[in-house]
Amino acid sequence: MYKGFLKNITEPSLEVLRYVILIAMLFYILTPLVWLFITTFHPRGGPYLEIPEKPTLENFLILFGIVKMRVGAAAHPVYMHKWLLNSFIIAITTMIIVVVLSAMAGYALSRLKFRGKSILMASLLIIGFMPTIAKLLPLYKLCIMLGFINNLIGVAIVVASGALPVQIWIMKGFFDHIPRDLEEQAWIFGCSKLSALFRVVMPAAGPGLMVVAFFSFLAGWGNFTVPLILIRTETLFPVSLGIASVFLHHPGEIGLAVEYGPLCALSLIYALPSIILYYLTRRYLMHIKLARIEVGV
Amino acid sequence: MLKLIKFFSLSNIYKLLHRVLRDIKSGLIDIYLPLFLVPALTLLIVFQLIPTIWAIWYSFTDIELLGRKLFEYNFIGFENYSDLGEDPIFWKSMSVTMEYCIYSLVIRFTIGLAAAFYITSKMRIAKYIVALLLLPYTIPGTVIPYIWLSMLDTRYGTLNRLLALVGLPPQSWVYRRAMESVIMINCWAGYIMAMLILASALKSIPEEYYEVCEIYGASRLFRFLHITLPLIKYPLILCIILIFKEDIDDFTYVYMFTEGGPHYRTELLSLYAYHKAFAYYELGYGCAVGVIVAIIVFLLTLAQIKLSRIA
C-alpha cells in the first residue's frame, strides 16, 4: 500500500518534470534562433531581442548588392550569389564523393570476411585523430603539388576525405542489416551479382544513402578550415569564408564592426538549403544503424 | 622492356578491361569486391594519413613558418617535446582542455540522451520536437559564434536581459565567464549527432521487452539500467568517442569568440598548436603539440573501448 502511495505521487510529478525539462531545453535551443529570425527583418538590428515595428527586406537587398551597406563594412564587396554558387559546388561534390565511396567501402566491409577487418575498421576511426590544425601545413604543401589551390573540386575532395570514416561506419551498419538471403534469392532468380547489387541491395540501403547524403552535404556546406587554407581569390570563396571576410576583421574581435541585420539575413540564406535537405531526409534520420564495435585491440 | 611496352599497349589494356567487365558480368564479382575499398582508402591515405605522418616528422624538426628555416630545417630529436614539459602555458592549456572536454562531453551527452528519449517517446508532439531540436545543426559553424556573441553581450545581450527579468545582476559573459560561455556555445549545436545516433538505437529496441517489464512491474530505473542501457551500449560508446574527438579537435568557437583570451583561460590545446605554428611561426613546436593531442585522444579511445568490453 505504501508503495502504491509513493507511485501515485511520483508518477504525475515525473510527468510534470518531463515537460519542465523539455521546455527548458527548447528555451536554450530556440532563443538564439528566434533572435536570428527577428533581426533578419529588423531595419536597425542589434544584439537585443526586439520585435521591429516595421519589418523590412532591406537586409536581403544589401546582401545581393542592390542597396548599399550603410557603414563599417561598406568598403568591402559582397559577392553573395558567387559565394552561394561556390558553396553549392563544394557541398554537392563532397556529397557525391562521400555517398559513392562510402557506399562502395561500406558494402565491401560488410560482405567481405578477412583477417584484420576489425583493425581496419578501428583504424578508420583513429586515422582522423590528429588535430586538423597540425595537419594544415602538410596538407597545404600536398595541395600545392596536386594543384588544389583555388580549386573548388580540390576543396571538396579534401573535405570528403575528412568526412569519410564516420560515414563508412554508418553505411556499413546499414548494409549489415540487409540480410544476405535477399541477395542470394536474386542470384537464384538469375540476377548477376552486379545487377543484384544495383536492383536489390542499393534500394534496400536507400535510407542509409539519404542519411550519408545529409551529413556529407552539411560537412561540405559549412566547412571553414579547408577553404581557409586552399582558396585565395575572393570570388571563389564559399559563404563561410565570405562571412568571415566581411564581418570578421580581427579574430577575437567580432562584434565590434558587425552589421547585425545583413549578417542575420546571410545566415538565414545560408541555413536554408540544409533545412530543405533535412526536410527531405527527415524520415530516415531516426533510423541510423551503426556498425557494432568489435575491435580486438 | 619490350614486354613492358606490350603490357601497357592500348590493345592490351583494352583486352584487360574487357576481361574484367566480362568477369563482373558473369558473376565473378567476389574477386573484385576488395576493389570497392580502394577509392575510399586511397582518399583517406592521401589526405589524412600522409599529412599526419608528415606532421609527426615536422614535430621532430626545428622548422619555422617564416624565413630561412622553412626550407633548411634540421632534425633535432625530442627537443620540442622536452621543451613542452617545461612550458607553463602548455600545462595551463592542458588543464583548460581537460575541463572544456569533460564539461562539454557531459552536457552534450546528457542533452543528446534526453533529446533522444523525447523524440522516441509516444508524446503526440514528438514529431514537432524533432524538427525544432534539429534546427541548430542546420546553422553553419561560422555563424554560430556571431549569434551567441549577440546573446551574451553584457549591456544589450538577450541572456542578461533575461537574467534581469528574474532579478539577477548582469554577467560579463565573454570576459569573466569565458569558459562557461564557450562550453555553452559548443553544446548548443553539439548534441545533435548524439541525439540522432541514440534515438536510432532506442528505436531499434523491440517493444516486447518493455511489455514484459510492464507485466512484471519493473521500476523505471530497473527498466533503464537493465534493458535500455545494455541494448544501446555500442552506439553510446561510439557517441562518446565521436564527441570527445570533436571537442578536442575543433577550435572554431574559441578562435572566433575569445581567441584563447583572458589570460589563457580558454586556450585549448588545438588553439595553442595553431598559435604556436601560425602566430609565433614555430611550426615544429606546434606540430609537437598536435602529436600530443593525437596521442591523448588515441589512448582515451582505447581506454573507452577496453572499458566497454569489460562492462
Image (cartoon, coloured by chain):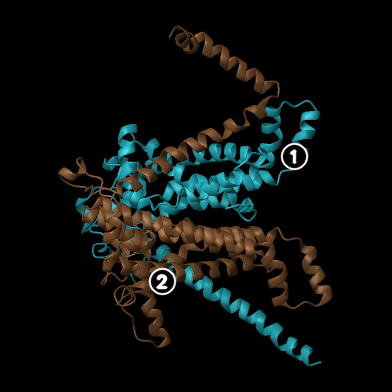
Chain colours: A cyan, B brown
Residue sitting farthest toward the top: B2
Residue sitting farthest toward the front: B77
Left or right placement of residue B298 versus residue B168 in this view: right
Kindly identify which residue carries mark 2. B99
User: Within 10 Å of the Cα at label 2, are there few (<14), some (14-19), or many (20+) other Cα atoms?
Assistant: some
Q: Residue at x 50, y 73 (%)?
A: A27
State whether residue B264 appears in this view: yes
* Residue A66, percent from left and from top: 29, 48
Q: Which residue is drawn at 36% across and 72% down?
A: B179
* Residue B125, percent from left and from top: 64, 67
Q: Which residue is drawn at 71% across and 31% down?
A: A196
Residue sitting farthest toward the right: B215
Q: Residue at x 51, y 41 (%)?
A: A98
Q: In which quarter of the image is residue A159?
A: top left
Quarter of the image that includes the N terminus of chain A: bottom right
Secondary structure at badge 2 equals helix
User: Closer to the camera, B306 or B290?
Assistant: B306
Task: Tell me the distance, in whole angstroms, between the alpha carbons under discs 2 and 1.
Answer: 47 Å
Whether B16 is drawn above or below A52: the answer is above
* Residue A201, percent from left and from top: 69, 37
Secondary structure at badge 1 equals helix
Q: Residue A180 carries which label?
A: 1
The amino acid type found where label 1 is placed reads Arg
Whether B123 is drawn above or below A10: the answer is above
The amino acid type found where label 2 is placed reads Glu
Left or right placement of residue B140 versus residue A114 in this view: left
**Please, which chain is the residue tagged with disc 2 on?**
B
Left or right placement of residue A103 versus residue B173 in this view: right
* Residue A110, percent from left and from top: 65, 41
